[in-house]
Image: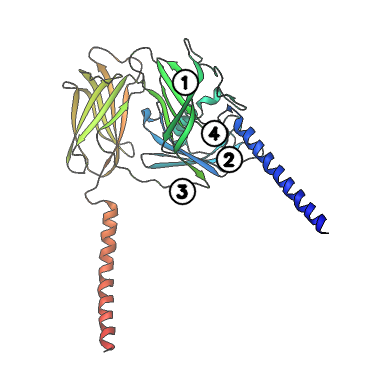
Amino acid sequence: MQVNKAMSIMMSLLVGSMIVATAGLLKNAYAADNNWYVGEGAQSNTYVTYQIQDFDVNNGRPFTLTIYFEKQDDRGDWIAPTYAIDQGTVFNGTLNLSSLDMSVLGKGTQIPKEMNPYVNGYKDSLDWLSAYVPKPGQSLSAPTWGKIASIGGSPIAPSGNEKVTVQGGTFDTTKIVYHKSVDNVIWVVNEFPFPVKALTYADITTGNPPIQYKFELLAMGTGKPKEVTSVTEVPKPPLEQTTATGRYFIDLNWTPAEIKPGADTTFDVSFFDNAHRPIQSVAYNFKVTDSKGNPVVDLKNQFTQGTSGQQKVNFKDGGPFKVSVMIDAVGSSDPGNFVENADFNIVVTPEFPIALVAALAALAMAIPIIARTTRLKGVFAGGSN
């Protein structure tokens, strides 16, 4: 009996050792896989949050995007509740992402139309590499992953390792590089579904190219991300936007910095070329609209004095407004068929913010209650003596 018991214990230990060793081998074999593709390593009940800047979304204004890999459907595709935040406004929807390359599938995707630009920003940035590395992926040490489909296009290729730190953490990455006018770099991590960082530029023939897309991992975690609600952000001057073609920068500054109804606000508009050199003699249109699209001012054929133009606006009401600046001409040059414009979101602060009014109202209602309670306490205190 004791011999059999001893043999049983020895066999259990041996089997346990074999299981541990096998698990170690599997782990090492898994880690040794040097292939990567968009979507690799995605796991159910996890999320990622990125800050994304895409040239084709709001003229390159950054926004954040959170993707929650909730679960996979019967085809293996991802059901991914997603929300974007742009200047405090939250857009919610659900994406159906292909298990092959994380592309957005029409079937199963449910988003409001207001969220379309941000989903397009996802396609143009986080998911851009999927055209070159769909599942099962390509080697992180391959000489090339493919070539940009344009004349003079450079190969897209792994180009060495680099340790990078982003807000979401520090990672050992492989740099994916291609050259079009300048070096474009995307940093990927083996067994992680999206690159953790990228900086790429628009393809232009002259001048300094504007950023095509730029992103960075802000956070990642397990479990459903915390729900967020829209808040009104008050932009601070100065603001800058590129025009749709990337040919010009337009800067908007204003004084006083806090815009209030009933008082004049002075707006300064400045113009720069794509190398950020000031330009003069600009003819432009200046328009301000409220949240319903109603014009507050609509000024045509305005001209800069030197490198900037100045406009005064008096707002009757508080709330969000949009300032639109459109270039008509630079010197004797006509912008041609392209619309060179930029939109800026601003907020006019009421003299008494709504939250303050509500707080004062609540306090006013509470004063009689406090006073009555105090008198009652005095009565009870007197009765106990």
Residue under label 1: 177
Query: Residue 192 in the image: x percent, y percent?
Result: 54, 34
CA separation in Å, label 1 and label 3: 36 Å
Residue 55 vs 370, above or below: the answer is: above
Q: Amino acid at mark 3?
A: Glu
Q: Amino acid at mark 1?
A: Val
CA separation in Å, label 1 and label 2: 27 Å
Query: Residue 260 in the image: x percent, y percent?
Result: 21, 43
Q: Which mark is residue 43?
A: 2
The disc, 3 or 2, on the residue closer to the chain's N-terminal end is: 2
Q: Nearer the viewer, mark 1 or mark 3?
A: 1
CA separation in Å, label 3 and label 2: 20 Å
Q: Nearer the viewer, mark 4 or mark 3?
A: 4
Q: Residue 316 vs residue 105: left or right?
A: left
Quadrant of residue 361 in the image? Answer: bottom left
* 329 or 214, nearer to the observer: 214
The residue at the far top in this view is: 151
The disc, 4 or 2, on the residue closer to the chain's N-terminal end is: 2
Q: Which type of secondary structure does the marked residue at label 3 adopt?
A: loop
Q: Which mark is residue 193?
A: 4
Q: Which type of secondary structure does the marked residue at label 2 adopt?
A: loop
The disc, 4 or 3, on the residue closer to the chain's N-terminal end is: 4
Which quarter of the rendering shows the N terminus?
A: bottom right
The disc, 1 or 4, on the residue closer to the chain's N-terminal end is: 1
The residue at the far front in this view is: 3
Residue under label 3: 227
